[in-house]
Image: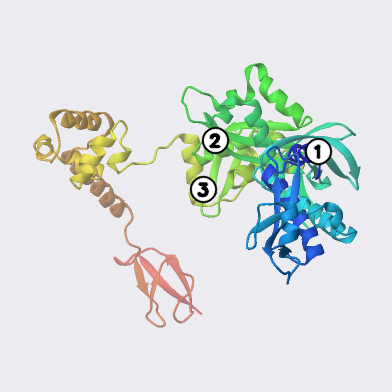
Amino acid sequence: MASGLADAIRGLVHEKGISEDLVRKTIEDFLYAAYKRKFGTVENAVVRFNDDYSEVSIFARKSIVEEITDPVFEIELKDALELNDECEVGDELLIEINPTDFDRGAVQSAKQKARQTLREIHKDTLYSEFKDKEGEMIIGYHQRERNGNIFVDLGKIEGILPKRYQSPRESYHPNDRIKALIYEVSKSPSGLQIILSRTHTDFVKRIFELEVPEIYDKTVEIFKIVREPGYRTKISVYSNREDVDPVGACVGIKGVRIQAIVRELEGEKIDILKYVTDQREFIKNALSPAEVENVIILDESKRQALAIVNESQLSLAIGKKGLNVRLANRLVDWNIDVKTIEQFEEMDITIDSKRELNALFNDIEEEITSISELPGISEHLVELLTANNIELIETLVSMDRNDLEKLEGFTEEDIKNIETIISENVDIVEEEELEEEEFFEEQEEEKDEEESPEEETYECPECGAPITIDMTSCPACGIGLRFEEEEPDNEDGEKLEEEE
């Protein structure tokens, strides 16, 4: 039965990617379905393949009896002896069923079920295969186009490159080779659907992994990618090895690597910048190719920053239709405002921001108080001092050598290192100098008080309220006042007149 079956099985395994066991099970189900349609049961049906799967047969298992009560499950002894002369009552006999014994309806029903089963198996197999490849790169060929959507031949199945996932810079023609990202794999009643993309940032990431070996082996890693498909991409990278320049690795010798990536993206501009933890420096890098003079953090909680550039760099920093600064905002996750130096000087900003600006332009260093911030101090010394409840520089400076020797865990070398660090980085002001400075400050204050005597007061002639010489009316009763100087007849020297 079913000669050439082995070739058919091998064809299904090769073309559809279905395992041999699943194909064999499907054929068994096909025969069982035809048997059930003919005899109403499959309890006594047995399907057997030969060793190389080139032939398959179906048998009916029947018990040998003297008198038949159920012809489906029983056979008379005389009929059984014709098939096997050594059998006897009570034995079971496998009787091969000729396929021609099945009626046409049974065979058609079984075939339909087999085809449906094979389709489901094929769909499940492809789904498992491509679902595991989501986010990976794949290469196919332009097959046809409908309503702007491109159908791509992927070999085993057809993928779809929707119009919204196509770069506006690119155009496609039949039989064109298309490299795309497997974006989404899903099953539907109509079949398996594989959505491809050339606009997502992961597509750019996969291209960099293909072209830059340092990214593939994790020597250089991508921190973040932002993209406006067809126009510009910004990618921030960092290196896990000090001797490897992350930006240089991505560019390649004479730009050969980045040129290959730009060609794949059909000429889309790519800015590669180094990721740093310093937010000001990262914002500077993110606005490349513009050169930024300084970056001011306006509101750290709201992540608002101000980038100051020269007049010649303003249009480059903002970009066409604001594209460059918009991508920089997304890359660093800050709201960046770009101003020239002249525009900044006209701005009304907070005192804290102005103080920060002065620190940036005048290199004013903030005073440090923690011992961990001392230049040159090792983690070992910081841990020892912290274990002895010494965390402030002021506390450490107030201790002499005897105090340091009493600390737990300190060696002679540790004490010498501390003394060296303090002598090189801490300016100690002696107590006598402080007292002298305080003395001169008190003298200056007393001198200022003597030069600014209290203003002399008088009484209002009308109500007796206190008034001063600079008043033109009484603050209590409102009567007009005028002070005049006259030749003194006595020691008073002034005459107060009342003006109605």
Q: Name the amino acid, label 1.
A: Gly
Residue bearing the label numbered 3: 353
Can you say whether 301 is above or below 290 in the image?
A: below
Task: State the image quarter where residue 71 is shown.
Answer: bottom right
Q: How many marks?
A: 3
Q: Which of marks 2 and 3 is in front?
A: 2
Query: Between 218 and 284, which is closer to the camera in this rendering?
Result: 218
**What amino acid type is highlighted by mark number 2?**
Tyr
Colouring chosen for the image of the structure: rainbow
The relative height of residue 426 versus residue 485 in the rendered view (above or below) is: above
Pair 3/1: label in front: 1
Marks 2 and 3 sit apart, C-alpha to C-alpha, by 25 Å
Question: Reading the chain from its start, which is encountered first: label 2 or label 3?
Answer: 2
- Please indicate whether residue 259 sits to the left or right of residue 109 in the image: left
Indicate whether 368 appears above or below 66. Answer: above
How many C-alpha atoms fall within 10 Å of the one at disc 3: few (<14), some, or many (≥20)?
A: some
C-alpha distance separating marks 1 and 2: 64 Å
* Residue 64 locus on image (x, y percent): 68, 62
Residue 226 at what x, y percent from top left?
Answer: 66, 41
Image vertical order of residue 46 relative to residue 75, above or below: above
Label at residue 205 = none
User: What label sits on residue 275 in the rendered view?
Assistant: 2
Q: Which of marks 3 and 1 is nearer the N terminus?
A: 1
**Please, what is the three-letter code of the amino acid marked with disc 3?**
Ser
Q: Which residue is identified by label 1? A: 4
Can I make out residue 304 in this image? yes
